Image: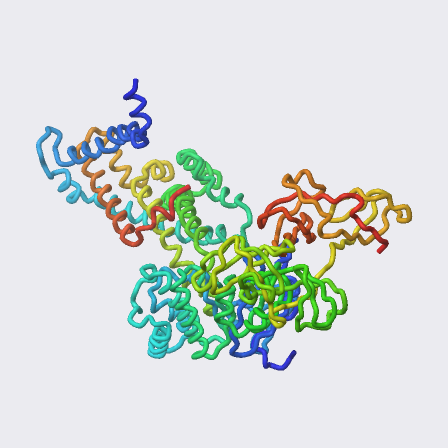
Amino acid sequence: MKDSNFIIELNHISKRFGDKVVLDDVSLFVKKGEFVTILGPSGCGKTTLLRILAGFGTASEGEIRIAGEQMTDIPPHLRPVNTVFQRYALFPHLNVYDNIAFGLKLKKVKADEIDMRVRRALKMVGMTDYEWRDVNSLSGGQQQRVAIARAIINQPQVLLLDEPLAALDLKMRKDMQMELKQMHKELGITFVYVTHDQEEALTLSDTIVVMSEGRVQQIGTPIDIYNEPSNAFVADFIGESNILNGTMIKDKAVSFLGHEFECVDKGFGENTPVDVVIRPEDIYIMARTDSGMFNGVVQSCIFKGVHYEMTVNTAEGYEIMIQDYNAFEAGQEVSMIIKPSDIHVMKKERLCNSFDGVMVDSTHVEILGASFVCAEQADIEGGEKVKVEVAFEKIELMDNKDDGVVEGDVRFILYKGDHYHLTIRTENGDNLYVNTCDVWDDRDIVGIKIQPEDLKITKA
Amino acid sequence: MNWLVKTFSRRHNWSIPYLIFLLIFVVLPMILIVYYAFHDADGNMTLRNFTKFISNAEAANTFVYSIGIAIITTLLCILLGYPAAYILSNSELCRSKVMVVLFILPMWINILVRTLATVALFDFLSLPLGEGALIFGMVYNFLPFMIYPIYNTMQKMDHSYIEAAQDLGASPMKVFTKVMVPLSMPGVMSGVMMVFMPTISTFAIAELLTMNNIKLFGTTIQENINNGMWNYGAALSLIMLVIIFATNLFSDEDDTSTTNEGGII
């Protein structure tokens, strides 16, 4: 770890605001000259991580090294990094020239050198002749360019970009993406880029770090992340996908959608429950024939520009999404084929909910910060620590939060072809995983109830 | 009945009572001041009131002296008020609103009560009343009017400007001088307006805190009007109004957003 191949070394960074854990043991190593994107939905901790890198926040635990130097407690003005802020943060009392020259003037660089470098930076961002303009008179895209020029003129070892394109319209965003990539190539410095836009991440990066709920979910090249997502969250967040429950029958054979398929994955063991990911563009669709692997009926067909997006109900009652250049109208009977190499098998992260709890008395157990009624436990005494398991489908969610024993809110929704797999965060911060056919929305507040006989209690 | 409902239901008609008030107590007196200033006691048009002011050394001296006192007061208010506002707006140093209220509290107490209390305080400490007491009283009375607009601008300042400066290599001292100070100038400007203008025209504070020994321009105007010299008094008022108006123009030019950023409470 200590060899300085890495320009940025983040070792076991955690960040807590009060009780709230924003970053949970994040480790990240970035090579010199890399374009790294930290990708995740809002509230996943990506901006907090960037701020810790820039020095605007301190980590509760962990160690930061930049260019081999210990940076954990170094204030921002002494770090060899510069930041492009989300809302640009150009100084309104200075013109374009003085904004860009700000860093150099602080370093007491000679006036004629500042002059030369400001002009070069402006040229690089395509803003020649804008020196004397008032920053408030510039458009969003122009302000963005000035913000980039202001950061790169200091020749930082690392350039940090906090959702720099989020405020621009689509067309402008695409142009700026290309320019950023070009700039990265010309400057040869390390870029750390934060975004929630998965397409932007795939376009720009050498390496993508997918984050969710303060944890790193996967680190890899865009191709790895897209083709071999390491868990259901990554598969769902990057691109479109069908995520289904399956069973690994043996090496290179998996069953899902009620059929057995040949695949290329192995080493999962026999008859192991797994998650199966299939990208919508990897399913071949054709009019009903006998040579298809499985059959279905088209439910809807939407024109998406390059392709059509179709929802198909299979004969076994699953709903899958398919993208194809050919349109099949709603109601049409179709057959589907999936190539073995397009089936991505992922180990299931868990097979049921399991909690650490304490027996209150023989018919009550305390889990999730509340007391639940359970079936009578003759051999476990009150006060004893226990392990409690609950199947995903045995948890009841109530519209009214007061109808449940505890309340929680929906954090993540995954459609699995015939049901939803929800992640519920309870009041005391535990995660609960629920299979349901009811439709819930992100951040819905729900009441949680579990029938006594569904709590499987064993001594810890 | 119907027209009444209609009249009252239109939003802009609600301002009519205040417009009437403005007309009687602001516009009309202004017209009267201008009229009186350019006429003599017999109602003949004349400029003698102004020539009298220029040729009368005493009145002119009082005028210059008043402006001097106002400038000193304003400068002292900036000197004391700026750091105070900075400390108040810095959430790390000052977590509760209690501090803000403590600084603003004097504004809620009548100016005469505060000034009489100052006189009592000087008596108690057996300090002499005079120029020093006058400036102390003025600063004490007007300081909150300086602190609040500056505090307001600092508080609304986007924190990312400070972070951007740090990021570009500015030490805490440089962040203060290169970013905080220039960006808080609109607040300082409104503070100056709130302090400088009223201090030119005060007379009660001057009378009480100097035992009538030091005359400010406000006192001169009051004396003339009290002694029935309406025309001369009106001319002096007009001169003061012009000066106030000029400072207003001067600071407006500096930053047009002053009024919406640094308003008082």
Give x and y (percent) for residue B229: 19, 31
Q: Please determine whether, in this image, residue B57 is positioned above or below residue B166.
A: above
**In the depicted structure, whether residue B50 falls above or below residue A125:** above
Residue A320 image offset from top left, x and y in percent: 58, 58
Residue A128 figure quarter: bottom left
Up-down relation of residue B83 to residue A262 (above or below): above
Give the colour scheme shown: rainbow
Residue B118, x across and y down, in percent: 44, 39
Q: Residue at x 67, y 44 (%)?
A: A397
Q: Relative to residue A377, is residue B190 drawn left or right? A: left
Name the one closer to the observer, A315 or B59: A315
Query: In this rendering, does residue B149 appear at all?
Result: yes
Residue extending furthest toward the right: A379
> On the rendered image, what quadrant is the C terminus of chain A found in?
bottom right
Q: Residue at x 48, y 71 (%)?
A: A204
Count every numbered label the image shows and give the total: 0
Q: Quadrant of residue A405?
A: top right
Along the horizontal axis of the image, is A88 left or right of A95? right
Q: Quadrant of the N terminus of chain A?
A: bottom right
Q: Nearer the viewer, residue B69 or A313?
A: A313
Instruction: Farthest residue to the top: give it.
Output: B1
Q: Quadrant of residue B115?
A: top left
The image shows residue B220 at horizontal and vertical percentages of 25, 37
Left or right of residue A157, residue A400 in this image: right
- The residue under the point 79% across, 42% down is A373
Q: Nearer the viewer, residue A19 or A305?
A: A305
Q: Confirm whether residue A47 shows in the render.
A: no
